[in-house]
Amino acid sequence: MKSVGQSIRKIDGMAIAMGKPVYTEDLAMANALVVKILRSPHAYAKITSIDISKAESLEGVECILTYKDVPNQRFTLAGQSYPEPSPYDRLILDQVVRYVGDEVAIIAAVDEKTALLAMKKIKVEYEVMEPVLDFEQAIGHSSVVHTEEDLSCNFDIGLQKDQNITSSCHEEVGDVEEEFKQCAVVVEDVYYPQAQAHTMMETYRSFTYLDHVGRLIVLSSTQVPFHIRRQLARALQISSTKIRVIKPRIGGGFGGKQTGAGDIFAAIVTLKTGKPAMIIYDRKETFSCTTSRHAMRISVKLGADQDGFIRALDMQVLSDTGAYGEHAPTVLGCVGHYTLPLYNKTRAVRFDGKAVYTNKMPAGAFRGYGATQGTFALESTVNKLAEHLKMDPTELRLKNISKVGETFLTGHGVRLGSSSLDRCIAKGKELIGWEEKFPSRDVGNNKVRAVGMAITMQGSGIATIGTASAEIRLNDDGNVTLLTGATDMGTGCDTILSQMAAEILEIPMEKIIVNAGDTDTSPYDPGSYASSTTYVAGAAVVKAAEELKGKILEQGAAFLEVTLQDVEFNGSGVRTLSGDQEISLAKLAELTILGRGNLQLVGYVTQGCEVSPPPYVAGFAEVEVDRETGKVDLIDYVAVIDCGTVINPNLARIQAEGGIAQGIGMALYEQVRYDEIGKMATNSFMQYKIPTRKDVGKVRIEFEESFEPTGPFGAKSIGEVVANTPPPAISHAIYNAVGVREHHLPITPEKVFLGMKKLI
Amino acid sequence: MQIKLTINDKAVKWDVANDELLADTLRSHGLLSVKKACDTSCCGLCTIWIDGKSMLSCSILSVRVHGKKITTIEGLPQEAEEFARILSAEGAEQCGFCSPGFIMSVLAMKNELVNPTEEEIIHYLTGNLCRCTGYMGQLRAIKTYLGVA
C-alpha cells in the first residue's frame, strides 16, 4: 500500500510546530469582549442576594449576568449522542452552587482588567449548606446535592437524587456466589483509582460572534462540535439552525474537551450584547472548574479452579461524579464493558455499580473512560490470583484471555473478530526480559529491581450508537475535497483519514483537501471520542472513496464511450483495459462539472458501528525501589499493542507513548486533591505534578498487528487503550520489589515507605 | 511607557503598560507563536530568547526588555524549520501547542551545549512540558537533529 501503513507526517504538522496562528485564541477578533466568571467560594450554598449594580456601572463593562438572566432549562455539558445518557442537571447559572468554583456570575468587559475589577465589585450573599465531600458517604447523606424538581433524564439511568445516586447499573450472568463456592482459589481486594486532571496544554477556550445573517458562530477548542451545537441550542433555547460551531486546531483534549466548558458563557454574552466575545479559562479554572477523571472505589473478587481457569468474577463500583453528572452513567458502565470481556473462561460474572453526586468538581470523560479505573482493579486482582495459584502471571493471562471467534458471558453472543493479545504478551515478555527478571532481584545499595505486568482492552467506537459520515468530492480541477466531522485534536486524524482516501483513490495525499470539524460544512460526526475516529470515521471515508471511485469509472467509461467493464482507474485517469484510450482525472472532472456531465461526482457514506472491536495492550514495567526511602524509579516500560492494522506507524507510536506517560502519571504522581472545605488543593502545576521528561523513564512501543474484519484496512482503535496498563503493571512491579500492595493511586514514595514499615 | 527593543532583528518602539507581561505584549503585536499555558512559570510554552538566551516570556515584565534583543520562532524561520521538520517526521509535535516554545529551547540548547549526553538533553529541557507525546518522540527528533545515536 502506498499511503496506508506509511509514517506520513501530519498535514498540519509544520504549521502548528512553527507557531502559525491556527488555534482559537489566534483567530479571535481583537475587539472581542473578555468574558470572566465569578465563582463560588463555597462547596454547597444557595445565593440569597446578589448585587451587581457597582460592577455594572464601571466604564467598559458590557454585561453582567446572574442566575436571574438565564433560560430556565436544564441541560448536560456531556458531549454525547442524543439522547444523552447524562442527566440534565445544570443551568447556565443556578441559584444553588454545588462546588467550589461553580459559576455565580458572567462578566463581559472591554478588557481583562475591567472584567476582573467588575468581578470584585459584585456582592453575593450565600446561605451555606453542609457539603457532601466524601463520595463513600454520599449515599444517604443528610445533604442532598440535587433537590431540584426539574432535573430530568432522557431514559432510566437508575438515578435516585434524594439518595445522591446519579446512576446505577447491574449486570449478572450465572450464579456468582455458587461458582465461588466451587473455586479452588478465591481472591478479593478493594481499589481506589483517583481523580486525574487532563492538563491538555491549551486550556479551554471559546470565541463567539454573530455573522452576517445574525447566526451565532462559535470557535471552540472542542472534541465535539456537533454536540456543542445541540448543547448550546438547548441551554440557550434557540434553534440549532442559528448556531455554527467550528473547531480550529486544538491543543490537546484527552476527553476533557468532550465536555462543554466556556462555550455557553461566551455564547450568552454574544447573544445578549450582539458583540464578539471570548472566554479563556486560566490554568486554575482548567484544574478546578471543568472536569477530571472519575475517582472510584472498585471491589473485585475472582475465583479460579485448580488449573488456573478463572470461573467467577464479581466487580462492584462506586464512582464519584462530583456536582454534576456529566458522563456518570457511561463511564460507570465502561468500567465493566472494557474489562469483563478480557477473560472468558468464566461461568458466572456480576457487575454492580453506582455513581454518586458530591460537592466537588464534576468528573467527566477522560481517555480510558472507566476502563482505566477498571483495569487497575481487575488486573491487580489477577496478579494477586496468579500469586495464590503459584502461576506466572503471564501464563495465567494466556490461559484465560478471549480468543478470536469466541464469545464472553456478558457479550450477548458477539464473537471476537481479531486479537493478537497472546502475541503481545509473548513479545512483551521477551522485550522486558521477563524470564530473567521476574519477580525481582537485589541490585545492592538497598535497592531492588522488579517487573510487573497487566493487559487491557478498550473499544473502537460505541457499538450500535457510533456513527460517522464522510463526503469526498471530485473538484473541477481533478483534486478532491474530503469533508468529515471527525475532530483532529492533535491526534492526526485529518492526516490518517486522508491516507485512507488516498489509498482507495490511488492518488497522492497532496491532491486531497481536508475540511473537518465545522457543523455548517461537515457531514455529521459525533466527534473524536470513544476511540472512534480511525475505526468509524475511517470506515466512512473508505466507503465514500470507493463510491467516488465507482462514479469516476462510470463517468470515464461514458466519456470514452465504452462499457464500465472495459475501463480501469489508475489514480491519474480512466483508461480502457486495452490501453488505447484514456481520459485524465482533471479532464474528466472539468467535463463533468463544467461540460456535458452536469453532475459533480461525490462519494457520501454514513457509517454505523455494529460492533466495537477491542484493541489490546500488554504492558510491562520494570521499577527500581529504594528500600530505605520508598522512592520508585521507573526503569523501563514496554507496551505491545494490537490495534489491528497500523494506518500510520509514527502517529500510532506517539499516541501510545503519550498514553503510557499519562498512565505513568496516574500510577505514580498525579492526584486531584481537595481540602477540608472542599476547595481544590491541586489547582496549578506546582501542586499537581504531571510527568516531566525526567519522570517517564524509558518507554518502548511495539505493534503486533492483527486484522480486524470490520475495520478500515483491518484497523482498530488506539487512542484510549494505551492509557490503561501503567497503574496495574507498575503497582505489580512495586509489589514484586518490596511486597507493598498499594491500592490507593498514586503510589507515592510515602505510601511505599509506610507500606514497607507496615504502618498502613 | 514606551520601550525600544529589537524584535526578530527589527527595531521597534512599543507602548506598554507598567504591569504588562512580555508574553502578552508579544501576542498583542501578532507574535502568536508565543503561548501561555500554566500561569505559574513552569510549562515552557512561552519560551523566547532575550539576547540569545532562552527565557519564559510570561515571567518578565515588558518594561524590563527595553533595549534588549528579542527572538521568537517567527524570527528563526530556517533554523526552526529544520528541526520542526525532524520533529514532525517523528509525529512528535502532536497537538503542536507546546512545540514553538519547545523548539526555541532546543535551538538554545544546541547553541549552549556541545555534544550533550542524553541525560544532559533531558535535564536541559525538563522545563518544557508536553502532555501529548510522552517525550520519547521528541527525544528521538533531538538525537536525529544533533546527529547523535
Image (cartoon, rainbow, N blue to C red):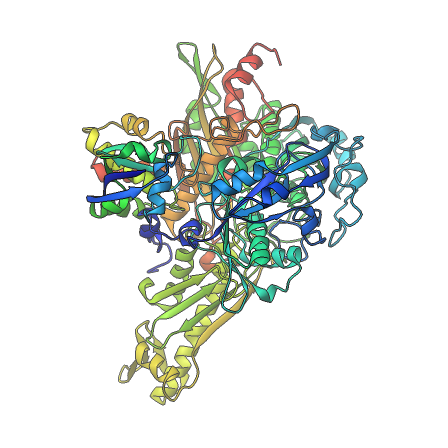
Q: Is residue A68 above or below residue A180?
A: below
Q: Is residue A25 left or right of residue A163?
A: left
Front one among A272 and A531 = A272
Q: Is residue A354 visible?
A: no
Q: Is residue A348 left or right of residue A233?
A: right
Residue at the (66%, 57%) spot, across then down: A234
Residue at the (69%, 29%) spot, across then down: A133
Q: Based on the displayed image, in which of its 4 quarters is residue A516 positioned?
A: bottom left
Residue at the (67%, 53%) spot, across then down: A84
Q: Position of residue B86 (x, y in %)?
A: 27, 45
Quarter of the image where the C terminus of chain A is located? top right
Q: Is residue B109 visible?
A: yes
Q: Position of residue A254 (x, y in %)?
A: 50, 43
Quarter of the image where the N terminus of chain A is located? bottom left
Front one among A178 and A377 = A377
Q: Position of residue A473 (x, y in %)?
A: 42, 72
Q: Position of residue A708 (x, y in %)?
A: 50, 54
Front one among A708 and A272 = A272
Q: How many marks?
A: 0
